[in-house]
Image (cartoon, rainbow, N blue to C red):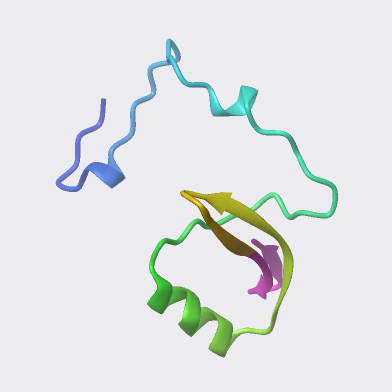
Amino acid sequence: MLQKAFPILEFDDDKNVFIKPYKMIIPMEGIPKTCVLCFFSEAIEKMTKEYSYKILSNFLSEGINYPMYELDYKNKKIV
């Protein structure tokens, strides 16, 4: 494992893993493949003020229904 000062930056290239996200992810029609997850409301609020966006869908997490935004960033669609 490549250890870093901050755990979120660590990377483990061991192929013998327990959780395999690629077996759980189901592509959705019309949803871009590039996705950024953010849990900071201030960052999301700033993004919605600075970029034009549309709400594609919603997802439920911990009992809260969050919007799924799509926007163009440097000529690439991201969610």
Depth check: give the residue in front, 58 or 26: 58
Range of the magenta residues?
Answer: 68-79
| Residue 49 drawn at (x, y percent) | 55, 89
Figure check: 59 above or below 40: above
Q: Residue furthest top?
A: 16
Q: Is 50 located above or below residue 47 in the figure? A: below
Residue 78 on the magenta segment: yes
Residue lying farthest to the left in this orientation: 5
Residue drawn at point x = 29 percent, y = 45 percent: 9
Q: Residue at x 47, y 21 (%)?
A: 19
Residue sticking out furthest to the right:
29
Question: Measuring 23% from the left and 42% from the top, which residue is drawn there?
Answer: 7
Q: Position of residue 25 (x, y in %)?
A: 66, 33
Residue 40 part of the magenta-drawn span: no
- The image quadrant of residue 77 is bottom right
- Total numbered labels placed on residues in the image: 0
Q: Residue furthest front?
A: 63
Pinpoint residue 79: horizontal percent, then vertical percent: 64, 61
Residue lying at 33% horizontally and 34% vertically, measured from the top left: 11
* 19 sits left or right of 10 in the view: right
Eyeballing the image, is 57 above or below 24? below
Q: Which image quadrant: the N terminus?
A: top left
Please name the predominant secondary structure of the magenta segment in the image.
strand
Q: Is residue 45 above or below residue 24?
A: below
Q: Is residue 22 left or right of residue 11?
A: right
